[in-house]
Amino acid sequence: MDHLTGLLLRTLFSYFFILVLLRLMGKRELGKMSVFDVVISIMLAEMAALSIEESNTPLIQFYLPMLLIGLLEITFAYLSLKSKKIRDIVDGSADMIIENGQIREDAMRRNRLNMDDLMVHLRQKNVKSIADVEIAMLEPTGQMSVFLKHDQETLTKGDLGIKPAQPVQSVTYKGLPIPLILDGKVRPEALQKIGQNELWLKREIRKYGIKEIRDVSFCSIDDQGIVYLDKKDTPRK
């Protein structure tokens, strides 16, 4: 009975200690937490669990490290208010993934995003096609902020400095835009779905002044037969 009472008291003390500590730290909503915030929360949760499980260990041995972590978090939060450089180190900074309707492959690689990840982020924002996006920013929290083009027109060859082409009349289907090329590789199942082949795809990308499929970062076609194409960035010297 004494053991049970001690366990309940330790649980109660740990609960209120963590609650007060988190309030002092000014924790944000889970969806708005940075990587640093998540790490701190995991460490506190782990030590709180150990303080309950290790009934033979004095609570002070768990509370002191938790208090130290809380003080460090408060200190870094204060320093972040004073210095953008420290804020970028602790919380990270936003990174532009799509700029002026064009995908930035360097930013994709830096954030370890692939095209499937990007499309998931856009669908979560109720965006059907990359062609509708003017700017997409990956926030330090891992969420993506998306700004659509004012007229939400699909990207044309005029946007790429190339004479625009007419929609592909032979493509008829209903649904979301289908990716035909991802990271320079053709998706045969996508071509099969729209009733076309790789030879047709090569002819289409040549209309954009691109000779090789491997030079295409992303290519999709919507149910109106309009092709969106993003050429791979030229490596910077």
Image (cartoon, rainbow, N blue to C red):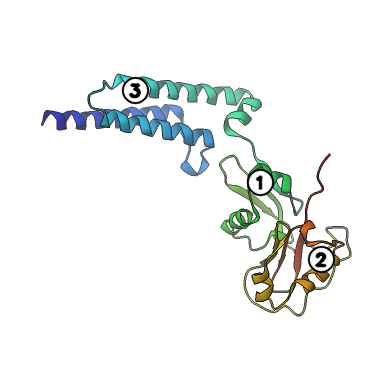
Packing grade of label 2 (10 A; few <14, some 14-19, many >=20) is many
Q: Give 2 or 54, whichever is nearer the viewer.
A: 54
In the picture, the quarter occupied by the N terminus is top left
Q: Give 59 or 17, whichever is nearer the viewer.
A: 59
Residue 53 vertical position relative to residue 160 in the rendered view, above or below = above
- Choose top left, top right, bottom left or bottom right for residue 182: bottom right
Q: Which mark is residue 137?
A: 1
- Choose top left, top right, bottom left or bottom right for residue 24: top left
Residue on which the image places disc 2:
205
Q: Give 188 or 111, whichever is nearer the viewer.
A: 188
Q: CA distance from mark 1 to mark 3?
A: 39 Å
Instruction: Tell me residue 99's x, y (percent).
Output: 74, 49
Residue on which the image places disc 3:
63
Q: What amino acid is labelled 1 in the image? A: Met
Residue drawn at (84%, 39%) of the image: 237
Q: Which mark is residue 3?
A: none
